[in-house]
Amino acid sequence: MIDVLYFAWVRERIGVPRERVDTKAATVSDLVDELKQREPRYEAAFADLRALRVAVDQDLSTFDAPLAGVKEVAFFPPMTGG
């Protein structure tokens, strides 16, 4: 089981801030593919991965990061400075 967290407009599209996911995904990208198959709201949230960032166990990561031993994956839009 992996805790999946959604922030900002990703959370708004999916409708929940977090969920526990039972997955066989090997990478973050595989997890996204599994999530997109669930419902149209997930497909909408993950339609353009270039508009998303991902953190694995609270470290900024990439979509090809392995999930073996991972406890948490978070998805969020890019941060902007100000």
Image: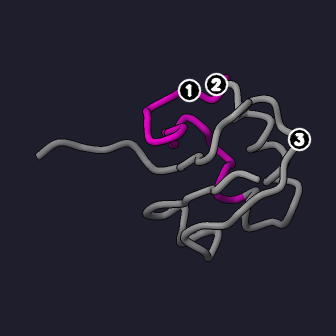
**Are the residues flagged by discs 3 and 1 in contact, CB closer than 8 Å?**
no
Residue with the mark numbered 1? 62
The residue located at (46%, 61%) in the rendering is 7
Displayed quadrant of residue 70: top right
The residue located at (63%, 56%) in the rendering is 4
The secondary structure type at the circle numbered 3 is loop
**Are the residues flagged by discs 2 and 1 in contact, CB closer than 8 Å?**
yes
User: Can residue 54 be seen in the rendering of this structure?
Assistant: no
Seen from the viewer's position, the closer of residues 52 and 67 is 67
Residue 24 x %, y %: 88, 41
Which residues fall within the magenta stretch? 44-64
- The kind of residue on which mark 2 rests is Ala
Q: Is residue 82 left or right of residue 6?
A: left
On residue 22, the disc is none
The secondary structure type at the circle numbered 1 is loop
Give the CA distance from mark 2 to mark 1: 5 Å
